[in-house]
């Protein structure tokens, strides 16, 4: 069975967001960080969020202020892999070099 994976890339062809090889957080986690930080009462500060997600306070600050993870893809790339039906497909396949979760 073949499985197609689509992801956004910059003008230079570099994968964006969670598709980038150095990404520590998924796109869903980034949205969760922004939502928690915007909650009334400022319950979630940089320190608490950093501890919860296992990243630095600077990383949280950059996400919350849209200094990082705010790029709009210039184009999209597709990659097709041969996947056995008995295996689950990893959503973060680009980090490990294979889309198959064994």
Image (cartoon, helix red, strand yellow):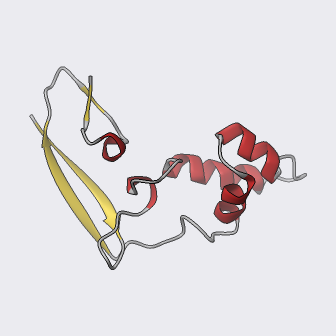
| Residue 3 in the image: above or below residue 17 | above
Residue toward you, 70 or 96: 96
Image coordinates of residue 58 in percent, x first then y, are: 71, 59
**Location of residue 2 by image quarter:** top left
Q: Position of residue 44 (x, y in %)?
A: 81, 47
**Residue 88 relative to residue 30: left or right:** left
Residue at coordinates 32% horizontally, 47% vertically from top-left? Answer: 94
Q: Quadrant of residue 93?
A: top left
Which residue is found at the position 27% from the left and 42% from the top? Answer: 97
x 71%, y 38%: residue: 52
Q: Residue furthest right?
A: 41
Residue 30 is situated, as x and y percent measured from the top left of the image, at 58, 53
> Position of 31 compared to 38: left or right?
left
Could you say which quadrant of the image residue 1 lies in? top left
Give the image location of residue 3, x and y in percent.
Answer: 16, 42
Which residue is pictured at 67% across the width and 65% down the height?
62
Left/right placement of residue 66 relative to residue 86 reads right
Q: From what the image shows, is residue 81 above or below residue 12?
A: above
In the rendered image, the residue lying farthest to the bottom is 11
């Amino acid at each position: 069975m073949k499985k197609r994976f689509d992801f956004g890339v910059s003008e230079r062809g570099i994968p964006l967001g969670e598709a980038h090889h150095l990404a520590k957080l998924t796109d869903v986690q980034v949205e969760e960080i922004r939502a928690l930080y915007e909650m009334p009462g400022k319950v979630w500060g940089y320190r608490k969020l950093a501890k919860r997600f296992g990243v630095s306070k600077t990383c949280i600050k950059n996400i919350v202020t849209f200094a990082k993870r705010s790029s709009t893809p210039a184009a999209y790339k597709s990659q097709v892999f041969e996947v056995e039906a008995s295996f689950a497909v990893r959503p973060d396949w680009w980090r490990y070099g294979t889309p198959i979760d064994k």
